[in-house]
Amino acid sequence: MKKMGILIITILVLIAVVGLGYYLIYKPHMKGKRAEQKTEIEQLYFHQNHAFGMGLAPSYLDYNKINKNRLIERLAAYEDSGQAKAEVSLDDIKQYLSGEYDESGKLAAENRPENIEAYIDWAWSDDGEKYIKDYIQWITNYQLDHTDKYSEESIDKLSEDKLLELIDDFKNCDDKDQYKR
């Protein structure tokens, strides 16, 4: 009987040590890993939302939150920069942002199409940010020189068609450098 008591006490002590180890070591470690993973996902959204002109929210925002004109300006800057690795269209972004998860159930932000990933990386870079800012200034300068065709209101307030026309006209103008001031 005494051996049985020692065996039971040993088993209880072993269970207590394993349980205590779980709560003191493993659980905090896993909590830290989850927090680290959450931070990485928030960074993906932060960069993505910034690249799409949707602000700096660290969470998923769907296509309905996009300011289309701002995105059109940014995509035009990307195309004009000579850094575009592949074309990115509004439809590409609309499809990409159609859900937080892709068809296979994976988080879309962790499984981006290559063209969108390349665009986000460029837009987030210092060179990309500067080029976007400069490009918007250039098309604004062009617009102000052509108020007979385009209104004087902000390019963000132009209709989508009028903005696309403005960008196309700027892209094809002979004296483009004069607007880069």
Image: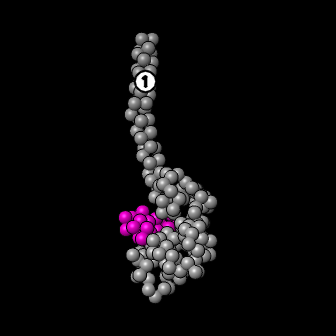
* Residue depicted at 43% across the width and 67% down the height: 133
The total number of labels drawn is 1
Type of colouring: one colour
Local secondary structure at mark 1: helix
* Residue depicted at 51% across the width and 70% down the height: 73
Quarter holding the N terminus is top left
* Residue depicted at 39% across the width and 67% down the height: 130
- Viewed as shown, does residue 15 lie left or right of 148? left
Residue 64 in the image: state x and y as whole percent: 62, 60
User: Which residue type does callout 1 highlight?
Assistant: Ala
Q: Quadrant of residue 125?
A: bottom left
Report the residue that reaches farthest toward the top.
2
Please, is residue 92 above or below residue 101 in the view? below
Residue 27 in the image: state x and y as whole percent: 44, 35
Q: Main secondary structure of the magenta part?
A: helix
Choose between 109 and 138: the one closer to the eye.
Answer: 138
Please, is residue 1 above or below residue 149 in the view? above
* Residue depicted at 41% across the width and 21% down the height: 13
Choose between 110 and 91: the one closer to the eye.
Answer: 91
Choose between 52 and 146: the one closer to the eye.
Answer: 146
Residue 155 in the image: state x and y as whole percent: 55, 70
Q: Quadrant of residue 123?
A: bottom left
Would residue 15 be visible to someone looking at this image? yes
Report the residue that reaches farthest toward the left.
126
Please, is residue 102 above or below residue 171 in the view? above
- Viewed as shown, does residue 151 lie left or right of 41? right
Magenta-span inclusion, residue 118: yes
Tag 1 residue: 16
Quarter holding the C terminus is bottom left
In the image, the segment drawn in magenta is: 112-134
Magenta-span inclusion, residue 64: no
